[in-house]
Amino acid sequence: MKHTPPTHASYADLLQVQATIEKLAKEINYHKGMVEDWASIEAIHSRFPDEEKLLLQLMRHGRKLLFASETQLVRCTSLAGCSHPS
């Protein structure tokens, strides 16, 4: 639009097309982010034993990943006995 004068016959149509493309790009980015969040949540979820997965319900619809960092799974059988997997 930088190089199209407002007096050009197609200017209004070009503005409409530009707005449509920008809206579509925003929707694509939003859905791409949702898919990436879902994949990250699924990877975290897969690290837990089956019996804990039922309690966590990480894979529930509408979940969104707010923060991600490196993690290490620590298994505690009591308050005094935690083991770090190698």
Image (spheres, rainbow, N blue to C red):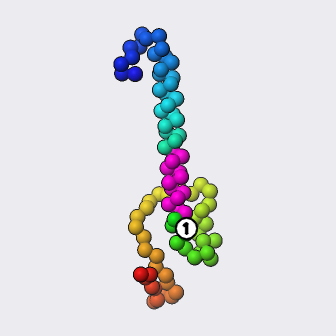
Left or right of residue 3: residue 54: right
- Look at 52% across and 41% down and name the residue there: 28
Residue 80: horizontal and vertical position, in percent? 45, 89
Q: Residue furthest front?
A: 86
Given residues 53 and 86, the one toward you in this image is 86
| Viewer-nearest residue: 50 or 76 | 50
What residue is shown with label 1?
45
Say which of 70 and 62 sits in front. 70
Magenta segment, prevailing SS (helix, strand or loop):
helix
Q: Residue at x 43, y 74 (%)?
A: 72
Residue 35: percent from the left, percent from the top? 53, 52
Q: Position of residue 51 (x, y in %)?
A: 62, 77
Q: In this view, does 1 lie above or below 76?
A: above
Count of numbered labels shown in the rendering: 1
Q: Nearer the viewer, residue 17 or 79?
A: 17
Q: Is 44 rendered above or below residue 27? A: below
For the N terminus, the quadrant is: top left
Q: What stretch is highlighted in magenta?
A: 30-42
On-image quarter of the C terminus:
bottom left
Residue 53 image offset from top left, x and y in percent:
60, 71
Magenta run includes residue 40: yes
At horizontal 42% and vertical 70% (from top left) the residue drawn is 71
Question: Is residue 80 left or right of 31 when viewed as pictured?
Answer: left
The residue positioned farthest toward the left in the image shown = 3
Residue 63 covered by magenta stretch: no
From what the image shows, is residue 6 above or below residue 45? above
Q: What element carries label 1?
A: helix
Look at label 1 and name its amino acid.
Answer: His
* Picture layout, residue 33 above or below residue 18: below
| Residue plotted at (51% across, 56% down) | 37
